[in-house]
Image (cartoon, coloured by chain):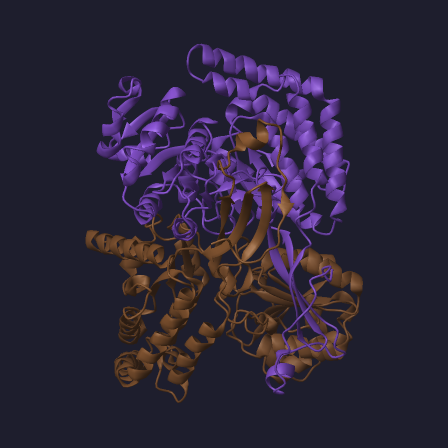
Chain colours: A purple, B brown
Amino acid sequence: MSDPSSSSSIGNAESIARAARRAFEESQLVATSERDVALKAIRDTLEAAKEEVIVANKKDMEAAESLAATGQLSTSLVSRLDLSRPGKFEAMLQGISDVAALPAPTGLVTFAKEIGPGLELHRVTCPIGVLLVIFEARPEVVVNIAALAIKSGNAAILKGGKESIHTATLLSSLIATALSKTSIPSTFIQSVSTRSEISSLLAQDRYIDLVMPRGGNELVKSIQNSTRIPVMGHADGICAVYLDESAVEEKAVRVVVESKTDYMAACNSAETLLVHESLINTLWPKVASALMDVNVCLRCDTATLAPLQNLPQAAQFVTASSESDYSTEFLGPTLAVKTVSSVAEAIRHINSHSSHHTDSIVTEDEAAMSAWCRGLDSANCFVNASTRFADGTRYGLGTEVGISTGKTHARGPVGLDGLVIYKYMMRSTKADGSVIADHEKAGKGYTHKDLQKGEPPF
Amino acid sequence: MSDPSSSSSIGNAESIARAARRAFEESQLVATSERDVALKAIRDTLEAAKEEVIVANKKDMEAAESLAATGQLSTSLVSRLDLSRPGKFEAMLQGISDVAALPAPTGLVTFAKEIGPGLELHRVTCPIGVLLVIFEARPEVVVNIAALAIKSGNAAILKGGKESIHTATLLSSLIATALSKTSIPSTFIQSVSTRSEISSLLAQDRYIDLVMPRGGNELVKSIQNSTRIPVMGHADGICAVYLDESAVEEKAVRVVVESKTDYMAACNSAETLLVHESLINTLWPKVASALMDVNVCLRCDTATLAPLQNLPQAAQFVTASSESDYSTEFLGPTLAVKTVSSVAEAIRHINSHSSHHTDSIVTEDEAAMSAWCRGLDSANCFVNASTRFADGTRYGLGTEVGISTGKTHARGPVGLDGLVIYKYMMRSTKADGSVIADHEKAGKGYTHKDLQKGEPPF
């Protein structure tokens, strides 16, 4: 984020941000159902332009493949760029229809009170405003985020990874074309392509309401350091499993092995295993064997290392841990292992070392479960369940906007309701209007009677 | 915020922040009802120490009075410092009991689903963590914020205006003494007294979760510029009233006059009046007269200025406006007046000039009301009601933590529920624990059945 911004990129960023704000404001008087009409138009436009999109995607693929050939890009990134794989384009289109089919998260009454005779107050969910979303080089994410923004009524400015530039630029322009035929302004979704534009956009706190960086810890921190705009994102995913004194074997093995190995690059995979000291010579070697059977390297403290010495696979998979291992997101087949003497010590370790994302206890003890769920300062506190469950789709949220490790606004897997806020609407039907003097000076006070939370007044 | 921090204040800030975090974490296993026990202990301790507090307050008063005598401090600030005014100390104590009597905002289930057989997910409200609250020189605010923090389960670090230092320091130490006799750690509420400590605390994003500046726009912006920690506050209060084409006289006069004059230093007072062009020679001169009768100066655009020329008070109260008047928080007896040709133009003007706080329309027209409440990007959208209603107590929120003009987490008057977030608790009761493979690989999928939102599982 430190590249110097030319004055032209500042001017450009400001006009993009202002256009987004205007598009958002204009859209507020458009009926909510028109958002679904717009999503259908986008789907149809993209469907008709499939060949053109695949041609643009080929350009990105060729550039990426030649970088990968010289080791400047990972092959997994190249494969994520590819929109021509069988079913991928169609899945992207289906994603739009799936989002359209969800209930709108706006226009819901979350609080309703009679303040006094003829004076009613409703708190109604509404879009946040203008979102700035920064994401990796996956072209279908452009379409996915555009759909989520439109469904929730938020205008959005998108910046994808530079490797997907040809595909992303074309997808954005097709989205604008589709919107221009609907009641939603065509500048409701805009894209930028350079880093210096991002840097200038982060100064536009007058027009932009929320920044959502989807990327590593470094990206999130550098954005938090360079803007007054609120940031919703997740930093690392340093998740832990704790085997409590009362843990039984089958649960322990299943939960630990899946939490670690199901998808090692995911943020909800386990990186740390804490073992109660009473299990060191009983359950722990069995769990360790199961992990080594699937090629997981174990970085152990002294106590957990000792009982593994005689296991045949130990020479290949077991090493001594260092302190930094307990704060590392390995994202691969390595697990840091540590002994603790109580659930309280496990909680303290996790609260000070984890990324407050997802942590699971394996236990039969109700008191330990309760301490775990209450004492752990993590978004997702699990009992006898794999950390891999921490996901918006698995939670049944309908869709997942992202996972937040922040402590305000939204936490954990974020669904569409993480893209809304609320406003208060107060309406007087008194013949002479309502003033506080009616209540406070005439000594009549307020009724503050709860009303049914039905439809919003407007 | 730009004063250079000495290394000792950084060290001190870090140890204060770390102690707050530890106090927060320890308190999570304490029963919620103990928070009310702690509030009672604080009330009793302060009550017993009244004389001592008044002595400390006298020191602050004397220093402030001598500064006021030489014009270095306003007399209104001096009067706000004074805890010895009849009833003030008792009101402060009663405030603690009032907060204790409110329902706890934590431990509420806001989402509950069966994910699959034997696997339940609950979303449960919980404290945010550690708050850093920066406020004006009003000693009773120390006690008020401590009570709100304890009730919501958040540890807090407080910094009051330097003019109240003797009183605030003593109150904080009495609070710590009271807490030391309860199950809540005595470092749950801490105070700092210098600006450089604040500057160092703003770097402690590892330990502090939310900063709440209660002060002017400059304070809020400078804090937003110097921290990665989320900030909840309100900047200006530039509120408007709009007289729509169909406005009737009695409502117009009552709403405008109270919105402007009831308490001119309040953030929910009107600073701008927009008048539909059709009312310029009819309703507008009547409203203008009512305002001038209570000594309000009117800064008018050309169209609203013309019809006032012949009114007797005009020479004293009416002047031509400049563009900057429409973005000014006068906080006094001045009102900027402007003509608009439609409700849409009024909305556009407010969205681009106001502080998104509170704006009221006077109208008889349902379509205009609906456009107003939907199109306005303000926390509080009012119809035929005074802007002065925008207040947590008047809304019946139980108490008011502050008013937020932000667009994330909490907006408008913020009650205790603005000091909480949530965590997800997932519990498996399956004999072999729960892994996603049970659902995704065995092809059984998820049930995602809504459960009754009753008590939290733990």
Residue lying farthest left? Answer: B8
Residue B96: x, y in percent? 42, 75
Residue A400 visible at all: yes
Q: Which residue is more in the foreground, B355 or B205?
A: B205
**Quarter-of-image position of residue B249:** bottom right
Residue lying farthest bottom? Answer: B86
Q: Which residue is more in the foreground, B241 or A394?
A: A394
Q: Which residue is more in the foreground, B156 or B217?
A: B156
Say left or right for A139 vs B364.
Answer: left
Residue B34: x, y in percent? 39, 67
Residue B9: x, y in percent? 23, 56
Say left or right for A300 vs B405.
Answer: left
Residue in the picture at 59% in, 47% down:
B113
Q: Which quarter shows the N terminus of chain A?
A: top left
B199 over A356 or under it: above or below: below
Say left or right for B144 vs A394.
Answer: left
Residue in the picture at 36% in, 39% down:
A243
Q: How many marks?
A: 0
B92 over B277 or under it: above or below: below
A314 over A193 or under it: above or below: above
Residue A15 visible at all: no
Q: Which quarter shows the C terminus of chain A?
A: bottom right
Residue in the picture at 34% in, 69% down:
B161
Residue A354: x, y in percent? 36, 41
